[in-house]
Image: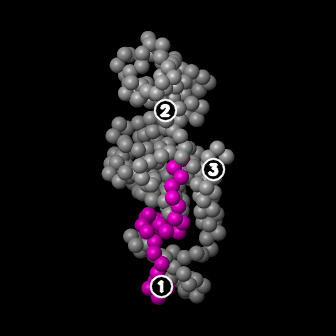
Amino acid sequence: MQAVVTIAAELRLFLRPGHRSGPVAVALDGTSSLGHVVESLGVPLTEVGRLLVNGESAAPGYRPCSADAVEVEAVRRPQQLAMPARFVLDVHLGTLARRLRLAGVDAAYANDAGDDALVEQANAGRRVLLTKDRGLLRRRKLQMGAYVRGARPDEQFRDVLDRFRPPLAPWTRCPACNGLLAPVARAAVDPLLRPGTRRTYQAFSRCGSCGQVYWHGAHSKRLGEIIDCAVRVVSTPLGT
C-alpha cells in the first residue's frame, strides 16, 4: 500500500538526495497520519503550507490511503501570525539574534539554552523558535518554529525578515540582551565613558535591562548598512 508524495521545490532540501528529483512513493502502514508521513521524509511541518490529497485540502491528521496523490506546499511568505513576530533563537544563531535586535525585532537568545528550555520559552512567550535543527522543529510540543535558511548571517537575516516581515524599530533594542533602549543624558553615563568618547559624542542610549550604554561610534556605518538591508527586505513587494 503506497501513496505518491510530491514535495514543493522549496522543501526538497529536507529530503534525502535520492528523493529530490520528483514524486516519492511512500509505503503506508494504515495508521500513520499525513503529517507523520511528511515528517518521515524529513520535512518539518513548520515549513509546510497547504497539504493536498487528490487535489483537495487535507489536515495533517488525515490518514493516507493507497494510491493517494499527496502534494506538500511550502508555507506562504510572508507567513501570517496572530500577533507581530517575536522570536527565540537556538544557541547557534547568536549573530542573527544580534542583527534582529539591531533592527528593533524582539529576539530572545541565550548561548547556553538547551532544547527543552527553548521549546518551553517559545511556547510560554508565543515566540517563533528559529533554528537550523530539523529535529528540534519536529518536536510535538513546539507550537511555532521556523527553519533558518542560509549558511551566513547575512543570508539568515534576509531569510527571516522575508518570511515574517516583522515591524522594524532600528536602534531601540540592546544587541547584547534584547532589552529596550532609551535616550540618556551624557551626564548620567559620564563615569562609564572613556575620555575620547566623552569628548567626541553627545547622544547616548542606555539599556533598561542590562545598563549597557550605546552611541553612534566608529561601527555605525556597518550597523547602518545592516539596518538598511532590513528595511529593503521588508519593503520589497512579494515576487520581486
Task: For residue 13, say whether it is visible.
Answer: no
Which label lies toward us, 1 or 3? 3
What x and y, as percent, mark residue 101?
A: 49, 62
- Residue at image position (50%, 63%) is 104
Element type at mark 3: loop
- Residue type, label 3: Pro
Look at the numbered disc 2 and give the secondary structure of its residue: strand
Residue 226 picture location, percent across and down: 61, 61
Judging by the rendered image, the residue that carries numbered circle 3 is 237
The residue carrying pointer 3 sits among few (fewer than 14), some (14 to 19) or many (20 or more) residues within 10 Å by Cα, namely few
Taking the view exactly as shown, the residue that stands out farthest to the front is 56
Residue farthest along the top direction in this orientation:
1
> What span is colored magenta in the figure?
163-190
Tell me if 222 is positioned left or right of 113 in this view: right
Q: Residue at x 48, y 50 (%)?
A: 92
* Distance between mark 1 and mark 2 Cα atoms: 53 Å
**Which one is earlier in the sequence, the residue at label 3 or at label 2?**
2
Q: Residues within 10 Å of mark 2 (few under 14, many from 20)?
A: some
Indicate whether 219 appears above or below 164. Answer: below
Give the alpha-carbon distance from disc 3 to disc 2, as whole Å: 22 Å
Q: Which residue is mark 2?
A: 50
Q: Is residue 122 visible?
A: yes
**How far is the residue under mark 1 from the one under mark 3?**
40 Å
Quadrant of residue 170 within the rendered picture: bottom right
Image coordinates for residue 225, horizontal then vertical, percent: 64, 63
Q: Amino acid at mark 2?
A: Arg
Magenta region, main secondary structure: loop
**Vertical placement of residue 96 versus 238, above or below:** below
Residue wearing tag 1 = 185
N-terminal of the pair, mark 1 or mark 3, is 1
